[in-house]
C-alpha cells in the first residue's frame, strides 16, 4: 500500500474516533464529575502512551526530554490536561453536547488570532473574516437562535466552552517551541498534569467509585480523545504527501459528531446548531482557502485567434 493511501487510512481512523468522543464525554459525565472524569481519562491515556512508546522503542527519550526542559513540561501539563480538560468537561456538563462541541471547535479560528501577539505573526484579512463569521455562528448557537432577544440557557457553560478554546490555543502556541518527539512531549505533559489533578480531586471531591459502564466511557475518552488518536493523526501527517490534504479531513469531525450525538444521546439537533456550525465550518474553510487562492499566479491572457 502506498504511503499516501496509508496516510488517509490513519487520518480517517483518527477522524472517526474523534467524532465519537463528544458523545463519550456526556455518557461519562452522567456518572462522574468533570474532575473525576479528567482523572480517569488522563490516567488511561498515560498508560496507553507509555505502551505506544514502548512499542516504538522510544521510552528512553522520556528522561532526556524531561531533563532538557522540566519547567516547560510543567507549564504544558498545567495547561493540558489539567486546566483544558477540566474546563472543557465542565462545559459539557452544563451544555447540550451539540452546543459544547460547536463552541469548542472555534479554537482553530482563535489560534491564528492569538499567534499575532504571542508569536509575532502577521494578522491576515482571511483570519479576521473567518473570525467574524465563526463568532457569528457562536452567537447563534449560544443564544439558541434568539439573536434579537439574547438569552443563554447556560451562560457559564458558554463561557467555559469558549475559555477551553483559549487554553487549547495557548497549549499549542507554547508547544511550537518544543523540538522534542511529539508523543513523548504529550506523555510528559500528562505526567506533569496528573499531580495537579490528583491533589485538586483529593482536596475538593472524592475518588470516583467503581462502575463498569461509567469507567468504560471514561477510559474510552482517555484512549481516543487524548492518547491513541493523537498518535494516529501524527502518523497520518508523517506519511502524507501534502499536510493540507489531511487537515481538510478535520472538517468532517464535527459533522459526524453531531450525528453520533443525535443517534446515541438522542439529542434533538436544533436549527441554531446547524446554522451556527455551518458558519463555523465555512469560516474554517475560508481561513484555509483564501490565502491559497491569493498565492496562485494570475492566468496568462489568451490571445484572440486569427
Image (cartoon, grey):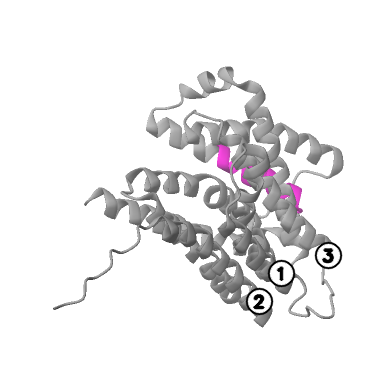
Query: Going 66% across and 34% down the picture, which residue do you hit?
Result: 77
Q: Residues within 10 Å of mark 2 (few under 14, many from 20)?
A: some
Measured as percent of width and height from the top left, residue 296 is found at: 37, 58
Label 2 sits on residue? 267
Give 32 or 176, whichever is nearer the viewer: 176
- Magenta residues, dominant SS class: helix
Range drawn in magenta: 32-46
Q: Is residue 31 visible?
A: no
Q: Which-is-in-front pick, marks 3 and 2?
A: 3
Residue 110's place in the image compared with 174, above or below, is below
Measured as percent of width and height from the top left, residue 137 is found at: 67, 70
Label 3 sits on residue? 155
Q: Is residue 288 visible?
A: yes
Residues at circles 1 and 2 in contact by the CB criterion of under 8 Å: yes
Side of 279 relative to 48 (left or right): right
Give 24 or 70, whichever is nearer the viewer: 70
Give 136 or 107, whichever is nearer the viewer: 136
Query: Going 48% across and 61% down the picture, which residue do you hit?
Result: 290
Q: Secondary structure at mark 2?
A: loop
Side of 78 relative to 289 (left or right): right
Q: Which-is-in-front pick, marks 1 and 3?
A: 3
Amino acid at each position: 500500500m502506498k504511503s499516501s493511501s496509508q496516510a488517509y487510512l490513519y487520518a480517517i481512523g483518527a477522524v472517526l474516533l474523534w467524532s465519537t468522543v463528544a458523545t463519550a464525554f456526556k455518557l461519562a459525565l452522567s456518572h462522574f464529575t468533570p474532575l473525576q472524569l479528567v482523572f480517569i481519562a488522563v490516567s488511561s491515556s498515560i498508560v496507553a502512551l507509555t505502551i505506544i512508546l514502548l512499542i516504538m522503542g522510544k521510552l528512553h527519550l522520556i528522561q532526556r526530554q524531561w531533563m532538557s526542559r522540566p519547567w516547560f513540561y510543567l507549564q504544558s501539563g498545567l495547561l493540558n490536561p489539567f486546566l483544558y480538560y477540566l474546563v472543557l468537561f465542565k462545559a459539557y456538563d452544563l451544555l447540550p453536547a451539540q452546543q459544547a462541541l460547536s463552541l469548542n471547535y472555534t479554537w482553530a479560528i482563535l489560534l491564528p488570532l492569538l499567534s499575532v501577539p504571542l508569536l509575532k505573526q502577521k494578522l491576515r484579512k482571511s483570519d479576521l473574516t473567518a473570525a467574524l463569521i465563526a463568532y457569528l455562528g457562536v452567537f447563534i448557537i449560544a443564544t439558541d437562535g434568539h439573536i434579537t432577544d439574547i438569552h443563554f440557557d447556560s451562560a457559564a457553560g458558554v463561557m467555559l466552552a469558549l475559555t477551553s478554546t483559549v487554553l487549547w490555543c495557548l497549549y499549542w502556541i507554547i508547544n511550537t517551541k518544543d523540538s522534542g518527539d511529539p508523543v513523548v512531549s504529550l506523555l510528559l505533559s500528562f505526567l506533569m498534569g496528573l499531580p495537579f489533578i490528583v491533589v485538586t480531586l483529593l482536596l475538593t471531591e472524592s475518588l470516583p467509585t467503581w462502575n463498569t459502564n461509567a469507567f468504560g466511557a471514561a477510559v474510552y475518552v482517555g484512549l481516543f480523545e487524548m492518547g491513541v488518536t493523537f498518535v494516529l493523526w501524527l502518523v497520518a501527517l508523517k506519511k502524507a504527501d501534502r499536510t493540507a490534504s489531511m487537515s481538510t479531513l478535520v472538517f468532517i469531525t464535527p459533522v459526524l459528531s453531531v450525528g453520533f450525538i443525535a443517534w446515541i444521546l438522542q439529542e434533538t439537533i436544533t436549527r441554531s446548531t446547524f446554522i451556527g456550525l455551518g458558519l463555523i465550518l465555512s469560516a474554517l474553510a475560508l481561513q484555509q482557502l483564501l490565502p491559497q487562492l491569493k498565492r496562485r499566479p494570475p492566468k496568462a491572457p489568451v490571445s484572440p485567434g486569427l
